[in-house]
Image (cartoon, rainbow, N blue to C red):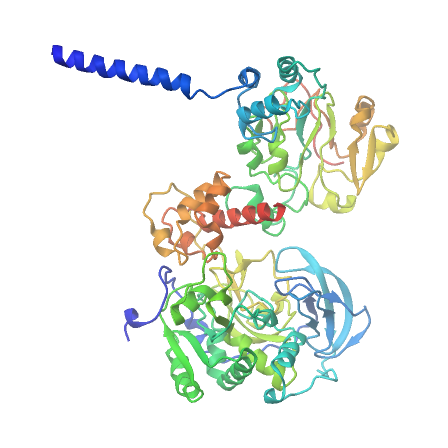
C-alpha cells in the first residue's frame, strides 16, 4: 500500500518536472493578438472569410495586419473589435443578407419531369438542366439549407428555400452551393426584391410559372431609378432601393416583394397578420 | 464450359438480361420518318458547326455539320431531302440543342464524291483521315470519336486490338444481331484497324450468353489469326477497362488512358461501320438499335437513320402498350432517361427502352446496413458506400482520396444495394465536383 503510494507519487513528480521543463523549453511563440482576435470571432468556422476556420482567419490577420477581409457572420461589430486589437482603423462595410430570388414552389411553377435521384439540387441540375421548366428558379431539394452554417434557410412544404433574415449572416455559402445562382447577396437594409430569376420571355414564363417576372417594365416605368429590366428580368437597383416601394403593388405577377411586410407564402416565417397577395397571375 | 473457366474481371453482377424478346429477331430496316432531326452534338467533344441553310436540298451522305477541333467529327445528311429548319430541337440530354431538320424526298440520292477504296492502297494516315471524314464515333454508346482512339501518341505503343462484342447491358441485342448477320463486315473492319494500328494480336470479346455468335465467329476469325474470347456473363463486362483486363490481364492504372496498356478497344458495330466508311465510302448515317422493354408492343432490332425521332421508332414497333413511365436511351443500367419521345435517335442510340408504371422498381431509400454488397459488385474495386457518403457530406476531397475518379458509373453498386441507396448517383456527383475543382485549379 505504502509502496504503491510512494511509487505513483514519484512517477507523478518525475512527469511534472519533465512536462514543466518541456513547456518552457519548447514553448511556441504565439502572437497574443491572434488569441485575442480568435476570442472575439464568432467561432462558427463557416469559412466565409476564405480561411480554414476562425483560427486560420485570426492567424492571417495577426501576421499580415490586413483587415480588408471581413468576417460576414460577425459583421461590423466583430471587425471593429478586431481592428481595435490590431490597433487599426475599422473598415466599414455594409452588412449583407442572402435572398432567394424565386417564389415558384411546386404549387406555382410547373415541373419538367419527376426527379427520382439523390436529394441534391446540384445533382438534379445536371439532369436535363433541372426538374423545373423554369431555367432559373429554386429546385427545392434543399442543398442550401443543409449547407447553411447558421440554420438560416428553411424549405417550405411546397419546395422553396426561404431565408430567415434575422439569422442570415451573409456568409455566402448558400450562394456558392446553388447550381442556378437563384440565391444572391443583397444589402441588409434593402427589403424590396424582385423574386424571380428567369430570363425567359414573358409569354414563356407565364406558361410554366404563375408568379414569375414577365419583363413587362411596369416597375421600371413606375420608378425608373429603382428598377432595371435586362434579359426580360427586372431587378432592384439596390443603390436606390428606398424608392422601390411604389412598384410593389403594381407588379401584375406579384413577383416584387417587400420583406418588411411579408415573406413568401407557405413559409413558417410569414407573419400571420400580414395579408399576402393571392400569388395567382391575373 | 463453366463460368469459372471463362475470363472476366473482379466484381460486377448479372442483372436479368431480358434479351430473349429480341435476340432471335433479324435486323429490319426502319422506314424513313416524315422528318429527320439531326443534332450537331452526337459525340463526346465539340459539337459540329452547321454548313447548310433552310431551304437547301441535301443529298444522302452530304456533310451538314463540320467538325470543330480534333475531338470532333462532321455530321452528314442521313438521306436526301430538303432542309426545313436549322434550330434548337429536343436532344437526348433533355436540353434544346442545335439540329438540322430534314424532310426526306424519298429518292435516297447519294452525294457525289463518296468513293470506295481498297484499304491496302491507303496509308494508315489516309485511312484515319477517311474515318474522321465519315464521322465515325464509338457506337457502343459512349460516342467517342474513333480517329482519336486510332491516333496513339508515340510514347504509347499499341500491341493489341480488342473488338467489343460483349453487349452486357440487359435488353440490348443490336451488336448480337450484327455479329450473326454481318460477320464479314466486322472482319473487314478489323483488317482496316490492323493496318492503321499495325497490330497483329486481335481479340474479339463476346459474352458467353451468345453461343451462336461465338460459334459462328470463332472458326471464321481463326483463319485470320483473330481470337474470339468467350467471356463470363457479367455486367459491366463490356466496359473498356474491364474488357482489357478480362482479355489481356492488363489493368488500366488510376487516372490513365486505356491506351497505356497497349490496347485499343472498338465496338463490333463501330468496326463494321469502319468497313462501310472505307470500302464503300459511306459515312455514319445509320446504326442498329434495339427497341424493346415491356412498354413496346412488338420489340424489334431496327437499322435506323441517325435523326429518326424516338416517336417514329415506337410507331414502327407497334406503338406503346401503356403510358410510358420511363423512356431510356441505351441500356437500363447506363442509359439516359428521356423527357419525351420528341428527341431523335443519334449515333450513340444502341437501344430505346420503354417501361410502364410499376415495371421498374423504385425502392424507398433506407439506411446502409454495412452489408458491402456494393463493394463486392464494384468492378473498379472501390468502396461505393464510403465514397457516396462523403459525397453527400460535401467532403469531395475525401471522396477523391478513396478513388472516386476511378468510378466508371456502371451502376452496379446502386443495383446491388438492398437498402435502395442511390450510390452511383452520389459518386457521379463527387466526380463532377472534383472535376470542377480541378478545372478551377
Q: Position of residue B75 (x, y in %)?
A: 69, 71
In the picture, residue B30 is in which quadrant?
A: bottom right
Residue in the picture at 75% in, 84% down: B112
Q: Residue furthest top?
A: A2
Task: Please state if A74 lies on the left or on the right of B368 as rendered.
Answer: right
Q: Residue furthest left?
A: A1
Viewer-closest of A204 and A28: A28
Q: Position of residue A55 (x, y in %)?
A: 53, 24
Where B266 falls versus A276 (above or below)? Answer: below
User: The C terminus of chain B lies in which quarter of the figure?
Assistant: top right
Residue in the picture at 50% in, 71% down: B265
User: The N terminus of chain B lies in which quarter of the figure?
Assistant: bottom left
Viewer-closest of B292 and B395: B395
Where A236 falls versus B348 (above or below)? Answer: above
Task: Please state if A95 lies on the left or on the right of A221 as rendered.
Answer: left
Q: Position of residue A17 (x, y in %)?
A: 31, 15
In the picture, residue B120 is in which quadrant?
A: bottom right
Task: Please state if A236 lies on the left or on the right of A222 as rendered.
Answer: left
Residue B181 visible at all: yes
Residue in the picture at 71% in, 15% down: A89
Viewer-closest of A122 and B55: A122
Residue B323 visible at all: no
Task: Please state if B55 lies on the left or on the right of B77 as rendered.
Answer: right
How many numbered marks are there? 0
Amino acid at each position: 500500500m505504502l509502496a504503491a503510494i510512494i511509487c505513483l507519487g514519484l512517477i507523478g513528480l518525475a512527469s511534472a518536472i519533465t512536462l514543466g521543463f518541456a513547456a518552457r523549453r519548447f514553448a511556441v511563440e504565439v502572437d497574443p493578438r491572434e488569441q485575442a482576435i480568435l476570442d472575439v470571432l464568432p467561432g462558427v468556422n463557416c469559412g466565409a472569410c476564405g480561411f480554414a476556420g476562425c483560427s486560420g482567419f485570426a492567424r492571417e490577420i495577426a501576421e499580415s495586419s490586413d483587415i480588408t477581409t471581413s468576417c460576414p457572420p460577425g459583421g461590423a461589430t466583430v471587425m471593429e473589435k478586431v481592428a481595435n486589437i490590431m490597433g487599426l482603423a475599422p473598415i466599414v462595410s455594409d452588412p449583407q443578407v442572402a435572398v432567394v430570388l424565386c417564389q415558384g414552389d411546386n404549387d406555382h411553377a410547373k415541373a419538367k419531369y419527376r426527379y427520382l435521384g439523390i436529394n441534391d439540387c446540384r445533382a438534379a441540375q445536371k439532369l436535363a438542366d433541372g426538374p423545373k421548366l423554369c431555367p432559373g428558379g429554386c429546385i427545392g431539394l434543399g442543398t442550401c439549407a443543409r449547407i447553411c452554417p447558421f440554420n438560416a434557410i428553411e424549405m417550405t412544404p411546397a419546395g422553396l428555400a426561404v431565408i430567415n433574415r434575422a439569422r442570415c449572416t451573409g456568409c455566402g455559402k448558400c450562394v456558392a452551393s446553388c447550381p442556378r445562382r437563384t440565391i444572391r447577396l443583397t444589402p441588409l437594409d434593402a427589403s424590396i426584391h424582385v423574386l424571380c430569376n428567369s430570363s425567359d420571355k414573358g409569354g414563356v414564363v407565364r406558361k410554366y410559372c404563375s408568379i414569375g417576372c414577365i419583363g413587362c417594365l411596369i416597375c421600371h416605368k413606375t420608378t425608373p431609378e429603382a428598377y432595371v429590366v435586362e434579359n426580360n428580368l427586372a431587378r432592384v437597383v439596390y443603390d436606390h432601393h428606398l424608392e422601390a416601394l411604389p412598384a410593389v403593388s403594381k407588379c401584375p405577377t406579384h413577383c416584387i416583394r417587400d420583406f418588411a411586410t411579408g415573406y413568401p407564402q407557405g413559409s413558417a416565417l410569414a407573419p400571420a397578420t400580414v395579408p399576402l397577395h393571392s400569388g395567382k397571375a391575373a | 464450359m463453366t463460368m469459372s473457366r471463362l475470363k472476366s474481371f473482379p466484381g460486377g453482377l448479372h442483372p436479368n438480361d431480358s434479351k430473349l424478346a429480341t435476340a432471335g429477331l433479324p435486323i429490319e430496316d426502319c422506314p424513313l420518318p416524315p422528318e429527320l432531326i439531326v443534332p450537331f452534338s452526337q459525340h463526346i467533344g465539340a459539337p459540329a458547326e452547321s454548313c447548310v441553310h433552310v431551304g437547301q436540298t441535301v443529298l444522302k451522305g452530304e456533310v451538314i455539320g463540320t467538325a470543330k477541333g480534333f475531338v470532333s467529327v462532321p455530321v452528314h445528311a442521313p438521306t436526301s431531302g430538303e432542309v426545313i429548319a436549322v434550330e434548337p430541337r429536343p436532344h437526348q440530354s433533355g436540353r434544346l440543342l442545335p439540329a438540322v431538320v430534314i424532310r426526306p424526298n424519298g429518292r435516297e440520292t447519294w452525294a457525289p464524291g463518296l468513293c470506295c477504296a481498297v484499304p491496302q492502297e491507303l496509308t494508315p494516315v489516309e485511312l484515319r483521315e477517311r474515318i474522321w471524314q465519315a464521322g465515325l464515333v464509338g457506337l457502343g454508346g459512349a460516342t467517342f470519336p474513333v480517329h482519336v482512339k486510332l491516333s496513339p501518341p508515340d510514347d504509347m505503343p499499341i500491341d493489341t486490338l480488342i473488338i467489343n462484342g460483349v453487349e452486357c447491358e440487359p435488353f440490348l441485342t443490336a451488336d448480337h444481331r450484327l455479329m450473326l448477320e454481318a460477320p464479314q463486315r466486322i472482319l473487314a473492319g478489323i483488317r482496316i484497324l490492323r493496318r492503321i494500328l499495325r497490330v497483329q494480336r486481335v481479340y474479339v470479346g463476346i459474352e458467353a450468353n451468345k453461343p451462336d455468335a461465338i460459334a459462328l465467329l470463332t472458326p471464321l476469325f481463326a483463319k485470320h489469326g483473330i481470337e474470339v474470347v468467350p467471356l463470363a456473363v457479367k455486367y459491366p463486362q463490356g466496359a473498356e477497362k474491364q474488357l482489357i483486363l478480362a482479355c489481356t490481364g492488363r489493368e488500366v492504372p488510376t487516372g490513365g488512358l486505356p491506351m497505356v496498356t497497349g490496347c485499343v478497344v472498338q465496338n463490333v458495330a463501330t468496326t463494321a461501320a469502319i468497313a462501310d466508311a472505307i470500302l464503300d465510302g459511306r459515312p455514319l448515317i445509320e446504326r442498329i438499335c434495339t427497341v424493346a422493354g415491356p412498354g413496346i408492343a412488338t420489340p424489334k432490332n431496327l437499322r435506323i437513320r441517325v435523326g429518326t425521332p424516338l416517336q417514329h421508332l415506337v410507331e414502327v414497333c407497334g406503338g406503346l402498350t401503356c403510358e410510358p413511365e420511363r423512356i431510356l436511351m441505351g441500356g437500363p443500367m447506363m442509359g439516359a432517361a428521356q423527357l419525351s419521345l420528341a428527341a431523335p435517335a443519334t449515333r450513340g442510340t444502341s437501344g430505346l427502352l420503354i417501361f410502364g408504371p410499376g415495371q421498374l422498381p423504385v425502392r424507398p431509400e433506407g439506411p446502409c446496413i454495412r452489408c458491402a454488397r456494393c463493394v463486392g459488385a464494384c468492378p473498379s474495386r472501390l468502396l461505393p458506400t464510403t465514397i457516396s457518403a462523403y459525397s453527400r457530406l460535401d467532403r469531395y476531397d475525401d471522396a477523391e482520396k478513396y478513388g472516386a475518379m476511378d468510378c466508371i458509373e456502371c451502376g452496379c453498386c446502386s443495383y446491388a444495394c438492398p437498402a435502395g441507396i442511390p450510390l452511383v448517383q452520389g459518386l457521379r456527383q463527387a466526380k463532377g465536383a472534383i472535376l470542377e475543382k480541378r478545372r478551377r485549379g
